[in-house]
Amino acid sequence: MAATQEAQQRDKDREILEYVKKHPIAREVEISEAVGLSRSATHARIVKLKKLKRLRSGMTVDLDALGF
């Protein structure tokens, strides 16, 4: 893989991570639109980031829905 392509992928990874940081419950389709990648490419990048432990899945509790 060419150095330029690797740099572009790192930049997209960074964009994905920044978006998820600001929007932790965003769906992949929202992330893909925000970073300018196809849904399949975004999914592949997210899977890679999870495998590398750069991105972790978590749980979110909706306190409003529970009446708190």
Image (cartoon, rainbow, N blue to C red):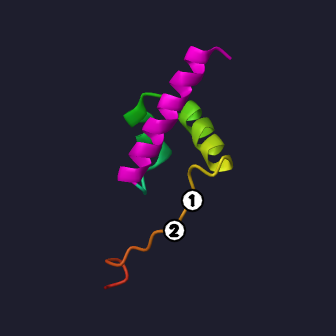
Which secondary structure, mark 2? loop
| Up-down relation of residue 58 to residue 27 (above or below) | below
Q: Which mark is residue 57?
A: 1
Q: Main secondary structure of the magenta part?
A: helix
At 47% from the left and 44% from the top, the residue drawn is: 17
Please tell me in which quadrant of the rendered image residue 36 appears.
Answer: top left
Which secondary structure, mark 1? loop
- The quarter of the image holding the N terminus is top right
Where is residue 24 shown, x and y percent of the image?
Answer: 42, 56
Residue stretch rendered in magenta on the structure: 1-23
Name the amino acid, label 1: Ser
Q: Which mark is residue 66?
A: none
| Up-down relation of residue 25 to residue 37 (above or below) | below
Where is residue 52 shown, x and y percent of the image?
Answer: 66, 46
* Number of residues whose C-alpha sits closer than 10 Å to that of mark 1, classed few (under 14), some (14–19) or many (20 or more): few
Q: Which residue is mark 2?
A: 59
At 59% from the left and 37% from the top, the residue drawn is: 45
Name the amino acid, label 2: Met
Magenta stretch encompasses residue 6: yes
| Up-down relation of residue 5 to residue 62 (above or below) | above
- The quarter of the image holding the C terminus is bottom left
| Up-down relation of residue 10 to residue 4 (above or below) | below
Where is residue 10 shown, x and y percent of the image?
Answer: 53, 31
